[in-house]
Every structure is written in structure tokens, then in C-alpha cells.
Amino acid sequence: MALYDKLFSALGLSDWCGDSVDGAPLSLSDLSVRAGGEEVSGPFFPIPSLDNLHESCNRVWQSRDVTNGIEEGFLAAKPALKTVLDPITQPLSWMLDGSLWLFEATPWFIMVPFLVAISWYASRSRPVTIFVAASIMLLAVVDHYDVAMQTLSIIFVCTTISVLFGVPIGIAMSKSDRLQKGVVPILDLLQTLPTFVYLIPLIFLFSVTESKLYGIAIILYAIVPVIRLTDLGIRLVDQDVIEAANAFGMNDRQKLMQVQLPLALPNIMAGINQTIMMSLAMVVIASLVSAPGLGVNVLRGIRNLELGVGIVAGIGIVLLAVILDRVSKAALTRVDKTQVKH
Amino acid sequence: MTQPMVSLRGLYKIFGVRDKEMLHHVQGGMCKEELLAHHKHVLGLNNINIDMQAGEITVVMGLSGSGKSTLIRHLNRLIEPTAGEIIVQGEDVMGLPEDRLRHARQEKMSMVFQKFALLPHKTVLKNAGMPLSVRGEDEATCDREALKWLNRVGLSGFENQYPAQLSGGMQQRVGIARALTANTPIMLMDEAFSALDPLIRTDMQDLLLELQKELHKTIVFISHDLDEALKLADHLVILKDGLVVQQDEPQHILLNPNDPYIEDFVSDINRARVLRVRSIMTPLDDGKVPKDAHGEVEVSDTLESMITRSGGDTSHAYVVKDGEKTVGTLDMTELVRALVPRVASEAGARQS
């Protein structure tokens, strides 16, 4: 790295850099120097990376210092974060465990008709209801009823919480351009961050035995569409109608409840549909951190190369996804229809 | 005359972030184009002074971009003026805090919109009852009142339909019923009939005049259509580039346009149908009734009906009656002359 050596001496930083007493393990090139006695000549103008600069100047960090720094920083902040986040998120664990218990404790001959009834109530569509009944029975026949119910229970809790938080956040965003500007990058980040990356800091923060660990990961991932579409839906409400509401002297609350939310409902429902789909996607990955359900079987299929187990579980997930999607979409079109009856 | 229901005093509106700073340019006589070119601000309204009398229909007319829709939105402060006073029933709307302003919008002014602006997710009945439910009236009262006015505007039997199921004309009837349900002394109508096709529009104008005959509301009507303006107006205000070009009784404007802009406007009008005997008769000074009169006519007769009556004979003359009283004479030669648009009269110099 002769070039950077010269650069540092030209800048008069040789003293500041100090002697190249290297405490770091030998690199491959160092080894080859020792073995052959001949320096491997690198490229004339190597990329100015931290590691390359470090070879010329000891004071410059190595790249692994950066990752170490992040880790240490996170670990240092962990106790404080934990004292704050632990009590706040504790109810999530209770809800997940409670719902899991409820779904498992309810005997199938009550649960299945109940689910079918819900899909009928939401969709009012006979084909959809029949499809739901058939799919659940199919899962039951291949002994996947219990795991499917576990997955459903997690989705149920996480979607409910996402909607409870997401809709008000979306409303607040639609009211304030500044808030929207601040929140949108966070939503972009949550949506683009690889799903596995969510899990890493959470594993450090919470114990893997706690169900809130996967709960938080799923909610963070799945809450995005409902926030986005609530914000969008309210912003898209016809300005003429808003003007009329103002002209007749509605206050903000009346405007929100009687005009904006009802007119934004189709968009909000589309957001909820997306939220359900995304929590299903995440619940499979969350099986890595002890989330029960169909994902565990998929994981087993990968780990033990049990092809059949993995594929049956995979098909089960697809069935569940189709059920949830069809029921929520049918509910959405029903809402849409009451808006514009022709 | 008594105190006007609504009066606008020195109203200015400049669109842009630094509107207050631009005010002195406008007051110094800068026109709309200059302001836009040099300061990137749009002049909406320029020193508007209008009195709107109780029980009258004031029509504000102008082409698109003349600021008429901006003007009407100042009355209930949907748009904030840059400067000026808006006095409604003796109270300055500009000084109202938010809750009183909302109250004023609920109790004093109702509005009818060009694009109807009905709530698509509510039935016609609930739409018409909306102003009352906003005020916190119970549902039975809202429905009763709404039903009453829906019947009045000719929408009996449609109350459980949704707005999207109705035609444009019917939707605007709901819009009018909604404004009437509010039972406010002032009605603001922003190009209320412009989106409707011509025949329906005529129907709606007749409906409005019929309602006005019994309700005597103070109506502010925005229009870009001179025929409509002349038909409805008790007081006509003509706007151009945010400036009041002329305001007067419509017949007077038609006979004495004071600006080439208005002359252009009035030149295509069927004057015989619009002008009335009252506007062109020779007033009677000393109570002498001409002997050779061919008959008696009413002051409110249109010139068209006079032409039919005289059979086109310009030598005829008539005695004009206002009820029982003889008020003037009408020479058919005068009448024919009045049918030709006059050059802008020097007398009516530019106002404001």
C-alpha cells in the first residue's frame, strides 16, 4: 500500500499514525510475505477502504471495529432500552399467549363452525365460505389443524394490534404534512429492511422464550400498509365534500367520523388486507425465533431435509393465505359496494 | 334602505405566501398581470365593495378566473381574505373566533355547490338532514325537516336512494334541499346550476325563483351565464379580474353598460325577452295621459310581449300601469330603439 503510505507522510500525519505495531491477527497477505519472503504486490491504487488505510496508518479504524462499535453501542444501550420496552411490550406477550391458549383450547367442532361463520359474516359470499370450510377441513385431515390454528392465532393478535395503532397513526399523518414527512422514511425502512434483520436486535433485547419477540417483529413489518393506506385514503377524500362539510360548520371530529373515515374506508380495508398478508409472511420467518405454527414445520423441512413435511406445511400456508385474502377482499368489495350503489 | 344583510368593505384577496406585503402594490394600482409577472402572487379580489340586501338575489357574474367563486367563499370564510371587512347582519365575520364562526356557518349561511358535494355514503334523506345533525338535533327532527324540504324540491320517494343513483339535476335538488333544511337566512349558491344541462337548468332556475317568492332568503348566486344572471338577479354584480366592473339593477346594466367588457357580454342577449317596460318607458311627469294610446300595459311586461301585442306596428303607443297607478307612456319606436345594444354610456363612469 505504498500509495497511502506516501499520502499520509505527505499530509504530515506519519507521527500521528504511529508505528505499525499490529496487534491484529495476521492477514493472508502477511502470511504469504512470511512464507515466500516476497510481498504480494496489490493493485497500484487500491480502494480507500478502512482496512487498506489501516495498513498504512495504525490510527485508522479497521472495518471490524465499526461492526464491533455498533454491537457494543447496542449492548450498552440495552439495559436502558430493556427497562423501558419490557413493561410496555409485556401485554403483547400476554395477548399472544392468551390467544394461543384460546385457539388451542377451543375444541375443533366449535372452532371450525365459528371460523366459517365469521367468513360468512365478513364476506357474505357463498363460494368464499365453502372454500374456507373445505380448506380448514383439508388441513385437519393431514393433521395440520393445530399448527394452522397457532399461526392463525398469531396473525389475529398481530393484525388487530397493527390496525389499532396503524389507523390512528395514519389519521395523524393525513392531518399533518410535517408528521407525514417524518414517518414515511421510517415506513420505507420498515418495509425494505430484510425480514431477518428485524430479528437480530430483538433477539438481543428480549429472551427467545418470550412470545413478544416474534410479536414485535411481525407487527413492525405488517403495520406499514395499514398506516400508508389510511393516510392515503383520507388524503384522497374529495375536497369538494370536505368543503361542503366545512361550509355547514362541521367540527374536526364530525368531519373525521362522518366524512373522512367513511369515505376512506375502502382504502383502509385494502390496507388491512395487506397487513394480514404481511403478518402471514412474517409469521413463517418468525418461527426462527420460536414462533409456533406452520412455519416450524417448514423450518423442520429445511433443517432435516424432510421434503414432504416442508411441502405440506408450505401448502398449508398457501391455503391459509388464500383464505385470509379472499375473506378480507370480499369484505372490502362489500364495503365498496355500499359506497356507490348503481 | 335598511341595513344590508351582507356587506363587503374593501375586500382584497391575494394568493401567495407573502400576500400581506403585496397588498400595497395592489392598492397602488398594480394590475393582475404585473403582480404575477413581478412578484409571483395571484390577485384574486381587488377592493370589493358590495351590499347585499335582505330578501334579494344578488348575482355575481364573471368569466372563469374573474374571482367569483373566491368571492362567495369569503362570505363564510372558507377562504381568508388578505384585507377587508365582511359584515353579516351587522357582525364582522372576520372577528369571529373559530367556534363562533362554525356557529355562523351552521345558523346563518348555507351553501349549494357546483359539483353538488353530497356525501356519497349517506342516503338522500341523511344528506338533506346533514345541516341539522351537525347542529346536534335528534334524528327524528333531522329526518322530518329533510323530508319536508325534499318534498318541496320535488324529490318525494327518493329519500332512501344514494346520491350516485340520481341524475345530476336530482342531485342538485338534494343540494338545494340540504341548504333549505339548514333554514338559514342566507343561501350561497356557487355556480349551482352550471353543471346541469340547459333544460334542467331552466327548471332549477324556476324552482329557485318559486322558492324565493315564499321564503325571501338573501341569496348570493354565482354564475358565468348572463341569461341566468338576468333571469335571477335583483342586483347584478359583474366581476372582471377580481374587480367589480359594474353593479346595479340588471335592466340598468343592460341598457347602460359602462365598460366594453360588459358590452361584449350583453351584445348576444335576447334583449326583448329580458328588458321590461319599466326600464324604457317615458315617466309621466304631470299626470297627463296621452289620448291616442292603444291600450294599457304593466310595468313588468317584457318587450317581447309588447311586440306581439302591437303586431310589430311601431306607430303604437301605450299607457303604462303599475297596478292601479298610471306611471308612464311607452312609444313603440322607443321600444325598437332599445333593442339595439348601445355604446357604453359616458354617464355611467366606472365604479369603485
Image (cartoon, coloured by chain):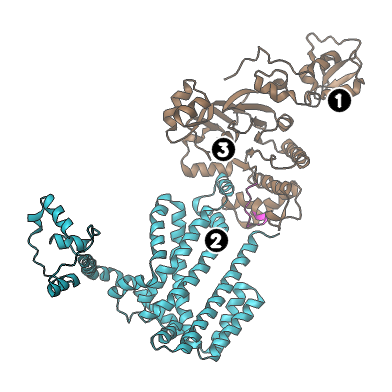
Q: Which residue is mark 2?
A: A267
Q: N-terminal of the two: label 3 or label 1?
A: 3
Mark-to-mark CA distance, 2 and 1: 59 Å
Magenta segment includes A183? no
Quadrant location, the C terminus of chain A: bottom right
Q: Which residue is mark 3?
A: B73
Q: Are marks 2 and 1 on the same chain?
A: no
Quadrant location, the N terminus of chain A: bottom left
Q: Nearer the viewer, residue B155 or B314?
A: B314
SS for tag 3?
helix
Dot 3 amino acid type: Arg
Tint applied to chain B in the drawing: brown
Q: Nearer the viewer, residue B140 or A281?
A: A281
Does B221 sit left or right of A325 as displayed? Answer: right
Q: In the rendered image, which quarter is residue A319 located in?
A: bottom right
Q: Is residue A256 above or below residue B267?
A: below
SS for tag 2?
helix
Mark-to-mark CA distance, 3 and 1: 39 Å
